[in-house]
Amino acid sequence: MQSLFDTLRLPEFLKSEAHLRKVWSDPATRVALLDRLGDAGFSRDDLAAIQALIDAQNSDLFDVLQYVAYAKPTMTRKARVDASRKPIYEALDPNQREFVDFVLSQYIDLGVDELQQDRLPQLLAIKYHSQMEGIEALGGTEKARATFVGFQRELYRVAIDRVASS
Protein backbone atom coordinates (compact mmCIF):
# COMPACT_ATOMS: atom_id res chain seq x y z
CA MET A 1 0.00 0.00 0.00
CA GLN A 2 2.87 2.36 0.80
CA SER A 3 4.26 1.64 -2.67
CA LEU A 4 0.95 2.58 -4.27
CA PHE A 5 0.87 5.81 -2.34
CA ASP A 6 4.56 6.75 -2.70
CA THR A 7 5.44 5.53 -6.18
CA LEU A 8 2.25 6.49 -7.92
CA ARG A 9 1.30 9.42 -5.72
CA LEU A 10 -2.27 8.26 -6.02
CA PRO A 11 -3.90 11.54 -4.96
CA GLU A 12 -2.08 13.33 -7.80
CA PHE A 13 -2.84 10.51 -10.22
CA LEU A 14 -6.56 10.71 -9.42
CA LYS A 15 -6.61 14.54 -9.29
CA SER A 16 -9.35 14.79 -6.63
CA GLU A 17 -12.03 12.84 -4.81
CA ALA A 18 -14.66 14.38 -7.08
CA HIS A 19 -12.65 13.37 -10.14
CA LEU A 20 -12.28 9.80 -8.87
CA ARG A 21 -16.03 9.61 -8.20
CA LYS A 22 -16.87 10.98 -11.66
CA VAL A 23 -14.46 8.62 -13.44
CA TRP A 24 -15.52 5.60 -11.40
CA SER A 25 -19.25 6.16 -11.87
CA ASP A 26 -19.05 5.61 -15.64
CA PRO A 27 -18.17 2.08 -16.78
CA ALA A 28 -16.10 3.27 -19.76
CA THR A 29 -13.94 5.70 -17.79
CA ARG A 30 -13.67 3.22 -14.90
CA VAL A 31 -12.08 0.66 -17.22
CA ALA A 32 -9.74 3.34 -18.59
CA LEU A 33 -8.67 4.27 -15.04
CA LEU A 34 -8.02 0.64 -14.14
CA ASP A 35 -5.98 0.28 -17.35
CA ARG A 36 -3.96 3.40 -16.45
CA LEU A 37 -3.33 2.02 -12.97
CA GLY A 38 -2.24 -1.28 -14.53
CA ASP A 39 0.10 0.56 -16.91
CA ALA A 40 1.57 2.36 -13.90
CA GLY A 41 2.38 -1.01 -12.32
CA PHE A 42 -0.70 -1.62 -10.19
CA SER A 43 -2.66 -4.52 -11.60
CA ARG A 44 -6.08 -5.67 -10.50
CA ASP A 45 -4.27 -8.34 -8.47
CA ASP A 46 -2.27 -5.64 -6.66
CA LEU A 47 -5.47 -3.72 -5.92
CA ALA A 48 -7.14 -6.92 -4.69
CA ALA A 49 -4.15 -7.53 -2.39
CA ILE A 50 -4.55 -4.03 -0.95
CA GLN A 51 -8.27 -4.69 -0.62
CA ALA A 52 -7.50 -7.79 1.47
CA LEU A 53 -4.84 -5.93 3.46
CA ILE A 54 -7.33 -3.29 4.58
CA ASP A 55 -10.03 -5.93 5.16
CA ALA A 56 -12.30 -4.52 2.46
CA GLN A 57 -13.02 -7.67 0.41
CA ASN A 58 -16.74 -6.86 0.45
CA SER A 59 -16.09 -3.29 -0.63
CA ASP A 60 -15.75 -1.85 -4.09
CA LEU A 61 -12.30 -1.09 -5.55
CA PHE A 62 -13.54 2.51 -5.54
CA ASP A 63 -13.45 2.38 -1.74
CA VAL A 64 -9.94 0.96 -1.80
CA LEU A 65 -8.73 3.82 -3.99
CA GLN A 66 -10.51 6.38 -1.81
CA TYR A 67 -9.03 4.84 1.30
CA VAL A 68 -5.47 4.87 -0.04
CA ALA A 69 -5.63 8.27 -1.73
CA TYR A 70 -7.83 10.25 0.65
CA ALA A 71 -7.99 8.24 3.92
CA LYS A 72 -11.75 7.80 3.48
CA PRO A 73 -13.47 4.92 5.27
CA THR A 74 -14.54 1.98 3.16
CA MET A 75 -18.10 0.74 2.91
CA THR A 76 -19.38 -2.62 1.78
CA ARG A 77 -20.99 -3.01 -1.61
CA LYS A 78 -24.24 -3.90 0.20
CA ALA A 79 -24.13 -0.71 2.28
CA ARG A 80 -23.44 1.31 -0.88
CA VAL A 81 -26.45 -0.25 -2.60
CA ASP A 82 -28.70 0.16 0.44
CA ALA A 83 -27.74 3.84 0.74
CA SER A 84 -28.28 4.47 -2.98
CA ARG A 85 -31.33 2.34 -3.75
CA LYS A 86 -34.00 5.02 -3.21
CA PRO A 87 -32.37 7.74 -5.36
CA ILE A 88 -31.50 5.16 -8.01
CA TYR A 89 -35.07 3.89 -8.25
CA GLU A 90 -36.69 7.34 -8.33
CA ALA A 91 -35.85 7.81 -12.01
CA LEU A 92 -36.72 4.28 -13.14
CA ASP A 93 -39.89 2.63 -14.38
CA PRO A 94 -40.89 -0.77 -12.89
CA ASN A 95 -39.13 -2.83 -15.60
CA GLN A 96 -35.95 -0.83 -15.22
CA ARG A 97 -36.14 -1.14 -11.42
CA GLU A 98 -36.44 -4.90 -11.68
CA PHE A 99 -33.39 -5.10 -13.96
CA VAL A 100 -31.31 -2.69 -11.87
CA ASP A 101 -32.24 -4.62 -8.73
CA PHE A 102 -30.93 -7.78 -10.41
CA VAL A 103 -27.70 -6.05 -11.45
CA LEU A 104 -27.21 -4.62 -7.97
CA SER A 105 -27.59 -8.08 -6.43
CA GLN A 106 -24.90 -9.35 -8.82
CA TYR A 107 -22.69 -6.39 -7.85
CA ILE A 108 -23.13 -7.10 -4.12
CA ASP A 109 -22.32 -10.79 -4.58
CA LEU A 110 -19.58 -10.64 -7.24
CA GLY A 111 -18.11 -7.13 -7.26
CA VAL A 112 -17.58 -4.15 -9.51
CA ASP A 113 -16.79 -6.21 -12.61
CA GLU A 114 -20.54 -6.88 -12.87
CA LEU A 115 -20.94 -3.18 -13.70
CA GLN A 116 -18.68 -3.23 -16.76
CA GLN A 117 -20.35 -2.39 -20.07
CA ASP A 118 -19.26 -5.66 -21.61
CA ARG A 119 -21.32 -7.49 -18.95
CA LEU A 120 -24.59 -5.90 -20.07
CA PRO A 121 -25.44 -8.50 -22.76
CA GLN A 122 -24.80 -11.39 -20.36
CA LEU A 123 -26.76 -9.76 -17.55
CA LEU A 124 -29.71 -9.20 -19.88
CA ALA A 125 -29.54 -12.82 -21.02
CA ILE A 126 -29.34 -14.14 -17.45
CA LYS A 127 -32.23 -11.99 -16.22
CA TYR A 128 -34.53 -12.29 -19.24
CA HIS A 129 -33.43 -15.64 -20.75
CA SER A 130 -32.10 -13.84 -23.84
CA GLN A 131 -30.42 -10.56 -24.58
CA MET A 132 -33.17 -9.59 -27.04
CA GLU A 133 -35.95 -10.22 -24.50
CA GLY A 134 -34.07 -8.03 -22.04
CA ILE A 135 -33.63 -5.25 -24.55
CA GLU A 136 -37.32 -5.41 -25.36
CA ALA A 137 -38.33 -5.38 -21.66
CA LEU A 138 -36.23 -2.27 -21.08
CA GLY A 139 -37.58 -0.35 -24.09
CA GLY A 140 -34.86 -0.85 -26.67
CA THR A 141 -31.10 -0.99 -26.96
CA GLU A 142 -30.41 2.65 -26.09
CA LYS A 143 -32.76 2.64 -23.13
CA ALA A 144 -31.23 -0.60 -21.80
CA ARG A 145 -27.73 0.87 -22.08
CA ALA A 146 -28.81 4.20 -20.56
CA THR A 147 -30.44 2.37 -17.64
CA PHE A 148 -27.30 0.32 -17.04
CA VAL A 149 -24.92 3.28 -17.17
CA GLY A 150 -27.28 5.79 -15.55
CA PHE A 151 -27.88 4.09 -12.24
CA GLN A 152 -24.13 3.77 -11.67
CA ARG A 153 -23.75 7.54 -11.37
CA GLU A 154 -26.11 7.52 -8.41
CA LEU A 155 -24.49 4.41 -6.91
CA TYR A 156 -21.22 6.29 -6.43
CA ARG A 157 -22.68 9.66 -5.48
CA VAL A 158 -21.40 10.39 -1.95
CA ALA A 159 -23.16 7.32 -0.53
CA ILE A 160 -21.13 7.45 2.68
CA ASP A 161 -22.93 10.70 3.55
CA ARG A 162 -26.28 8.97 3.04
CA VAL A 163 -25.26 6.17 5.42
CA ALA A 164 -24.21 8.68 8.08
CA SER A 165 -27.48 10.61 7.80
CA SER A 166 -29.81 7.59 7.82
Image (cartoon, helix red, strand yellow):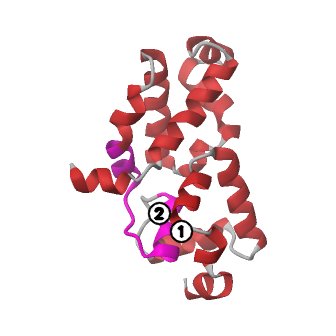
Q: CA distance from mark 2 to mark 1?
A: 5 Å
Q: Is residue 27 above or below residue 122?
A: below
Looking at the rendered structure, the secondary structure element under dot 1 is helix
Identify the mark at residue 144; answer none if there is no mark: none
Q: Nearer the viewer, residue 132 or 141?
A: 141
Tell me if residue 77 can be seen. yes
Residue at the spot of label 1: 65
Which secondary structure is most common in the magenta stretch?
Answer: helix
Q: Is the Cβ of the residue at disc 2 closer than 8 Å to that at disc 1?
A: yes
- Residue 71 percent coordinates (x, y): 43, 76
- Residue 163 percent coordinates (x, y): 28, 53
The local crowd at label 1, few if under 14, some if 14 to 19, many if 20 or more residues have their Cα within 10 Å, is many
Looking at the rendered structure, the secondary structure element under dot 2 is helix
Residue plotted at (56% across, 12% down): 137
Residue plotted at (53% across, 68% down): 65
Q: Is residue 117 above or below residue 14?
A: above
* Position of residue 93 in the picture relative to residue 79 (left or right): right
* Position of residue 117 in the picture relative to residue 52 (left or right): right
The verdict on residue 15 being magenta is no
Residue at the spot of label 2: 63
Q: Which residues are magenta?
A: 60-83
- The amino acid beneath tag 2 is Asp
Instruction: Pick the quarter of the image with the N terminus.
Output: bottom right
Q: Is residue 85 above or below residue 141?
A: below
Q: Nearer the viewer, residue 38 or 108?
A: 38
- The amino acid beneath tag 1 is Leu
Q: Nearer the viewer, residue 5 or 19?
A: 19
Residue plotted at (60% across, 49% down): 113
The local crowd at label 2, few if under 14, some if 14 to 19, many if 20 or more residues have their Cα within 10 Å, is many
Outermost residue on the right side: it is 39
**Quadrant housing residue 9:** bottom right
